[in-house]
Amino acid sequence: MVRFATSLSKESIVDVEGVVSLPKETLKATTQQVEVQVRKIYCINRAIPTLPINLEDAARSEAEFEKAEQAGEKLVRVGQDTRLNYRAIDLRTPANQAIFRIQCQVENKFREFLLSKDFVGIHTPKLISGSSEGGAAVFKLLYNGQPACLAQSPQLYKQMAICGGYERVFEVGPVFRAENSNTHRHLCEFVGLDAEMEIKEHYFEVCDIIDGLFVSIFKHLTENCKKELETINRQYPFEPLQYLEKTLKLTYEEGIQMLKEAGTEIEPMGDLNTEAEKKLGRLVKEKYGTDFFILYRYPLAVRPFYTMPCYDNPAYTNSFDVFIRGEEIISGAQRIHTPELLAKRATECGIDVSTISAYIESFSYGAPPHGGFGVGLERVVMLFCALNNIRKTSMFPRDPQRLVP
């Protein structure tokens, strides 16, 4: 039996029959504090003798590589592309097991919190006739002979559901972006966590939902996922996320002023680039002691066509972005709920109004003031765990270069 067991290749699937016993001395190199005295062993599925990547290599931390280098040893480093090419093996590393269990918890908590606040879960089409967001970053295809595209967002349909009297809705579903962004934080397909709600008095009602939602997610992960976070930390060390019980809100102009005072020149009515976002994140943490904050009242020129302009100054909007560790994770706003203004803004943004006529028309039947937000599930997990690449939090990522496995 021992000879048979030693002949089995690594990662083969086996059934073992034996007697479980407690060892006299504490076990240090195992995950369980018991031993199995093996009586029988069966090979259910034998792995090939030489695997394309070695699990021990894929599970090593940067500290282990540095230690080996100092000792004059040369360890095999498994690159990102190689990991993704053989993802079925790579997913077996302890860190990857933990990352996707954390992701599951974030999604569950998103649903749980919004359901507790009287939101209704919905499902919207991913095959649509026109762009969801405006612009050219859509995947185009033929739908029974007519041009169509994959939805960049459930935005228009969330709003139509609000017009349909649902008051508060949310969706968890795939989102498609045809941007040629080969960055550490962009994917062509990701899981969108979206919500939309009626506004009674002020669009800060939406910000308050985000505040409660994310504080509850962060608390849940910190308190109930200690084992998973420790496992990730062993391979990819990170500082625990700092956040406030009541989330900090700053105006866009206050953010710009903080950057200016720190010596960064920003276009007054322009959008923040990645570098400026990261710097603002560092400045906010130094001043307010939080990695998580809301920046609101963005200029009209940098927001989508359906964003409500400010009543006191139409050069600005009732909109906001939310940041974790200096990177944007949420974009949200109060939406325009009058068809005339909506059509005017769509035209000004270069969108063919005929392609979204059903959407605009739905506001002609009586539509309440409303607002909402969208966030990428993979980006939340990446930033909470301070990982350096969003591909680490997408089980089978789709970026401009990758369509397999």
Image (cartoon, grey):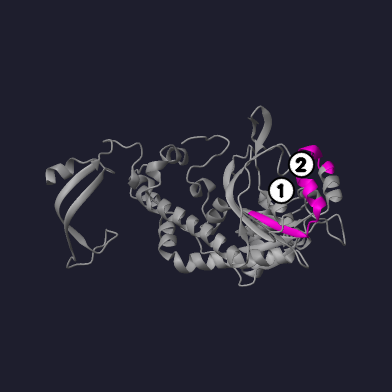
Residue 367: name its quadrant. Answer: bottom right
Q: Are marks 1 and 2 in contact (CB under 8 Å)?
A: yes
- State the mark number for residue 156: 1
Under mark 1, the amino acid is Leu
Let me know if residue 349 is in the magenta part: yes
Counting labels gives 2
Looking at the image, the residue that sits furthest to the bottom is 245
Q: Position of residue 45 (x, y in %)?
A: 26, 40
**Residue positioned 66% across, 50% down in the render:** 274
Residue 217, compared with residue 18, is above or below; it is below
Residues 33 and 174: in front is 174
Let me know if residue 285 is in the magenta part: no
| Disc 1 packing (10 Å; few <14; some 14–19; many ≥20) | some
Residues 193 and 36: in front is 193
**In what element is the residue under mark 2?**
helix
Q: Position of residue 67 (x, y in %)?
A: 37, 52
- State the mark number for residue 356: 2
**Residue positioned 57% across, 65% down in the render:** 113
Residue 247 horizontal side relative to residue 66, left or right = right
Q: Earlier in the sequence, mark 1 or mark 2?
A: 1
Residue 82 horizontal side relative to residue 9, left or right = right
Residue 191, compared with residue 293, is above or below; it is above
Residue 344 horizontal side relative to residue 131, left or right = right
Range of the magenta residues?
347-374
**In what element is the residue under mark 1?**
helix
| Disc 2 packing (10 Å; few <14; some 14–19; many ≥20) | some
Under mark 2, the amino acid is Ile
Q: Position of residue 126 (x, y in %)?
A: 62, 42
- Asked if residue 189 shows in the view, the reply is yes
